Image (tube, grey):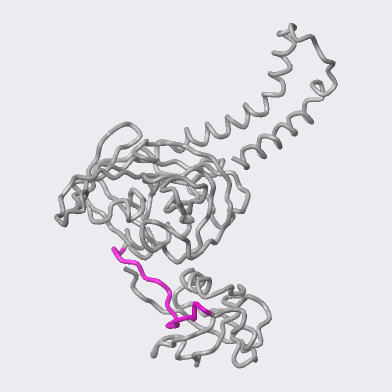
């Protein structure tokens, strides 16, 4: 709400400065409604043009968004009687139609379809067809699912460059909150590269998320986050909430990471990740850094080196602190995990390591590990 008020104030200020005639006009009697109407139309024009941007972005993207309905049988104990009762539960979510490796598929979150048989899932397209998946491929590490159907889908999404998304960018989220398909909300990017996020639907992938205050509620998962050009820049994945609904903090998988994993799933049915064979100390705090001679909140301390891995081969040790990876300063243990996951397999990467107070410049080549 604070953002909306600030946004309206800024737009209103811009509108007033652009409309010199409105600034210089004299006051008119309240009964002169025609003059008031003309003045109102002048200052409203910039807002109407902004509304057109939102409207055209959604209209352009709507045909590539699908609504997903899944029927699941769950065991519940409503009366706490000790006896479980099986009930039919309806789940909902969204997905995005994409061309991946020469095949038209639907991208969504794994938790939207997890544990549900394909014949219990219905995919509703923009033209109101109900389709049944013929194949679903998933990856747990990245909470991603690929849905394939036999029918030709109407369109495929245009993707934006998620590497160029910045804090403050205006975005639109489209999803199916509470089963209300193709609902649209607006917000801004509140943070990029958000890691180790608090979520309610299990363990979050250890990658850098976008954070947005666009309204996201249960059922919005798998829907696209759009820029103002109607390009998909991410998949809505999780919320941080104390109320169970929208508290203004939602997390989005950047589309570049999604497409990288999706292409492997479509081509090979599996996903491989870069791997260097290290474990890191999650409690490497300011006091431990000070003992290591590090005066800032940076670095990831190694607490495990796996034998016969790239790290063991270049002589990394328990107690070493990785300060930079591929020219990027390492913030903490979750950051280095993200940086390694984003690296290229079999391509050497320069790292800087603090060992007993001395900095060493080394090179490490990530190898392959199969992702779940």
Q: The N terminus is located in which quarter?
A: top right
Q: Position of residue 172 (x, y in %)?
A: 52, 41
Q: Is residue 281 magenta?
A: yes
**Front position in the image: 287 or 116:** 287
Apparent side of residue 97 relative to residue 56 in the rendered image (left or right)? left
Q: Is residue 259 magenta?
A: no
Residue located at (55% from left, 41% from top): 229
Say above or below: 43 vs 208. Answer: above
Q: Position of residue 36 (x, y in %)?
A: 73, 13
Q: Which residues are magenta?
A: 268-283
Apparent side of residue 233 relative to residue 261 in the rendered image (left or right)? right
Q: Position of residue 153 (x, y in %)?
A: 32, 40
Q: The C terminus is located in which quarter?
A: bottom left
Residue located at (20% from left, 46% from top): 120
**Front position in the image: 369 or 142:** 142
Q: Quadrant of residue 181?
A: top left
**Front position in the image: 330 or 197:** 197
| Residue found at the very far top of the displayed protein | 31
Q: Position of residue 305 (x, y in %)?
A: 44, 88
Q: Quadrant of residue 64?
A: top left
Residue located at (63% from left, 75% from top): 297
Apparent side of residue 35 relative to residue 98 in the rendered image (left or right)? right
Q: Quadrant of residue 89?
A: top left
């Amino acid at each position: 709400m604070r953002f909306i008020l600030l946004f309206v104030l800024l737009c209103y200020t811009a509108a007033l400065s652009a409309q010199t005639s409105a600034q210089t006009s004299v006051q008119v009697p309240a009964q002169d409604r025609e003059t008031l109407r003309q003045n109102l139309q002048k200052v409203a024009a910039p807002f109407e043009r902004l509304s057109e941007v939102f409207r055209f972005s959604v209209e352009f993207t709507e045909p590539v968004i699908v609504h997903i309905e899944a029927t699941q049988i769950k065991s519940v104990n409503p009366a706490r009687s000790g006896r479980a009762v099986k009930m039919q539960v309806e789940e909902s979510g969204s997905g995005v139609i994409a061309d991946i490796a020469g095949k038209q598929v639907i991208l969504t979150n794994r938790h939207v379809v997890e544990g549900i048989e394909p014949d219990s899932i219905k995919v509703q397209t923009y033209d109101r067809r109900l389709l049944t998946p013929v194949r679903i491929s998933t990856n747990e590490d990245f909470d991603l699912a690929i849905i394939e159907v036999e029918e030709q889908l109407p369109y495929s999404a245009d993707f934006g460059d998620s590497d160029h998304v910045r804090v403050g960018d205006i975005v639109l989220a489209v999803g199916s909150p509470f089963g209300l398909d193709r609902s649209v909300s607006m917000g801004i990017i509140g943070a990029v590269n958000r890691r180790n996020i608090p979520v309610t639907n299990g363990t979050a992938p250890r990658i850098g998320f976008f954070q947005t205050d666009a309204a996201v509620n249960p059922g919005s998962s798998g829907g696209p986050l759009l820029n103002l050009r109607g390009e998909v820049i991410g998949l809505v994945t999780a919320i941080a909430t104390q109320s169970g609904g929208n508290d203004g903090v939602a997390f989005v998988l950047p589309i570049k990471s999604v497409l990288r994993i999706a292409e492997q799933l479509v081509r090979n049915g599996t996903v491989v990740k870069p791997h260097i064979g290290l474990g890191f100390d999650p409690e490497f705090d300011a006091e431990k850094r000070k003992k290591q001679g590090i005066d800032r909140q940076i670095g990831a301390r190694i607490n495990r080196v796996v034998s016969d891995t790239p790290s063991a081969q270049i002589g990394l040790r328990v107690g070493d602190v990785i300060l930079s990876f591929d020219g990027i300063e390492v913030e903490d243990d979750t950051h280095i995990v993200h940086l390694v996951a984003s690296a290229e397999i079999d391509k050497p990467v320069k790292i800087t390591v603090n060992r007993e107070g001395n900095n060493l410049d080394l090179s490490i080549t990530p190898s392959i590990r199969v992702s779940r």
